[in-house]
Amino acid sequence: MGEVVQMLLRLVEKEQGSSMSAENPDDVLISPSGMFSAGFYRVGQNAYCFAIWFSKPCHDGSHTIVWMANRDTPVNGRRSKLSVLKTGNIIITDAGQFIIWTSNNTVRDHSWSQLNLLDSGNLVLQSLVNDTLWQSFDSPTDTLLHEQPLTQHNRLVSARSQTDYSSGNYKLMYDYDNVLRLVLDSPETSSIYWPDSTVLDYLQGRTRYNDSRIAVFDSSGYFTSSDKVEFQSADFGRGPWRRLTLDFDGNLRIHGICGPKSICSYDPSSGPKCSCLPGFKMKNQADWKDGCEPEFNLSCDNHDFKFVQFHHTNFFGYHYDILRNHTLEECAKACLKLCCIAFQYRYFPKDGAYRCYQKWELRNGYHYPSYNGTLYLKLPKSFQYNKPVEGLKLNCSINQTKQLERAYHKRTGYGSLEILIWCASVIGLLELICVILVFSFLYKTGISSNASTRGYHAAATGFKQFTYAELKTATRGFSEEIGRGGCGVVYKGVLSDQRIAAIKVLNIEVNQAEEEFLAEASTIGRVNHMNLIEMWGYCAEGKHRLLVYEYMENGSLARNLMSNSLDWKKRFDIAVGTAKGLAYLHEECLEWVLHCDVKPQNILLDSNYQPKVADFGLSKLLNRDNLKGPSFSKIRGTRGYMAREWVYNLPITSKVDIYSYGIVILEMVTRRNPTNGIPAVETSGEIWHQKLEAWVKGKKNGAAATSWVEELIDPAMGYDYDRNKMENLLEVAIKCTEAERHARPSMSKIVQLLQSATQ
């Protein structure tokens, strides 16, 4: 464009609104200096997104996109437009006048506003007095521009590929603990790959003690964050325009850009290159993000495979286990036994020892000369490997187009639709009038009195609604406390029908409506299994929220472990019963329940020492398709029993309960408390401690095959026990406590494994 023009979309009170059309290629906003342009950008065949880009084209005629509004819902090239409304909102509509994207402004009713594209690349909606009503800097896509902040309220999300601008799998975001992290969040897996999740944050220069959660990329090429991470561009200093992009060719480098089972190598002269491992081929010839696939059939037959080594090559994460002080031969044998697809063997000079990482998946692969580890890839013996891995340069240009699904689909029969909407509106109005009349009648006749409501709830749910006075009398003024935890205090009481009950006074917010509490309590009451505690009733009166449970004569597993009253058979039966109860919660009941706090205190024993899991309903009930919802934004559980998913803000699944169950089994067999640590090695007069699962795995790997169970088992059980059952129990517990959640078995599988030992 020869002339630099700044276009304003103005809106006066009597106008319907100004707009920009996807049909007109000249309908573009240009910043005053001409650096940036904004308008509808073609992302596929007849598919457009409203975007901001650098005005100067690349050598191939394409432009560098820095922001997109509707990146995941492109619109049709005809009759789609961006409009500024009189309410102070910006919307994008498709050809059918459906709203595809909106700015969702909270400030409304401005009689005049204008949309400006600033020289900073910020698209700003301003009022007559220059108040900012909305700006694109508050909602970045995959790029930060100069002085654009990254905060706790937004994140960078990579594009899906070089030619597909929709949301990809990589995210740069602040975690709940105030640390800036890079996260791989794909449909198959989710993991943090920066900073190193195996090293404590403070050892990597990060701090959690600043909750401002803000980072800025300034005009000098300097990036600074509130968690103390800092870096700068190679050409640091004022001058050229730079961008910080979470993408293949941006300044923020990421692992795994070449996809699964492939390697990324970097050469300063030629840039990044992707390559498939020997015996593998590119899965999608048009896109590296799909990675590579094997040209042979993977199997667990130890005799048909060999290992081929690759120096200075690493695949981060996704390992079954980390074996320490193993020889190369021992590591290879262990890999074949586990049916892994490769293993990493690396020497650590600081420890003076080798470590073996057995891989069940190959992701985040890279080759770098200074890396001192070696990858051993499992390949068929018939495969001949006699040439180096050849890399293909990443195609970072955007000269290809891809057919994208548009948000708009052609509509027909507008006249019939209008008639249908009119009829539906009339019917809806009549229904509303009927509802108002019915509620008015119920109110006047007193149908909704408290007594009747309690009777209805008892009939519908099958358990009783108690008054607070009844429960206060039953517990003699809440005088006999039998348990206490994060959810509340438990008292022993005798109900009016002479049944002994455990009455829990909950520590919850008073603002929870009685209807909401009743809905959750009724769900708990409907869960019925011999290894789950039975709920008899509840109380929701004023500020009081109480639950009434059956009373367990032998108390909690924690108390019995302290008193040393459990022989080996009781402990084994408790492990099996607990697994059955959790399996029912995870896989059999109608509404999927995660416990989120499995520990000995929440496993109760009846008069025959049969276990019953308690407090399972106090965790938030999940829909099966919602594993990442806001209900699990805060850490739940008890220190020592919590899976790493809580700490690293990974998706919460049933595998968190399985990890906690494994720790409970280890504690029950060894009678060692996981929250205290295990004395491990004495050096220079000091004793350091390690986690319970690490101590158990160390004993198993270090002891002879015939003695490791004896070294771990609680001496109080004596020597009169079934070694096969105890070994089976420990093996299951070790599997449950794997760091990678995908390597942990399901609860139903655990039940099968334990019951197999009794046959």
Image (cartoon, rainbow, N blue to C red):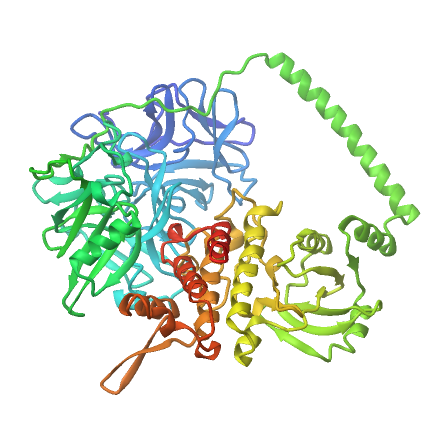
- Vertical position of residue 153 compared to residue 288: above or below: below
Q: Quadrant of residue 373?
A: bottom left
Among all residues in the image, which is located at the extreme right? 445
| Left or right placement of residue 300 versus residue 466 in this view | left
Q: Can see residue 377?
A: yes
Q: Which of the two residues, 324 or 411, is positioned nearer the viewer here?
A: 324
The quarter of the rendered structure image containing the N terminus is: top left
| Left or right placement of residue 458 versus residue 353 in this view | right
- Vertical position of residue 674 compared to residue 87: above or below: below
Residue 197, x across and y down, in percent: 31, 59
| Left or right placement of residue 524 versus residue 189 in this view | right
Q: Which of the two residues, 472 or 607, is positioned nearer the viewer here?
A: 607
Residue 728, x across and y down, in percent: 42, 60
Kindly identify the residue that appears in the image at 50 percent across and 37 percent down: 89
Residue 216, x across and y down, in percent: 30, 54
- Vertical position of residue 207 compared to residue 38: above or below: below
Residue 679, x across and y down, in percent: 34, 79
Q: Which of the two residues, 419 or 602, is positioned nearer the viewer here?
A: 602
- Vertical position of residue 195 compared to residue 439: above or below: below
Kindly identify the residue that appears in the image at 48 percent across and 66 percent down: 664
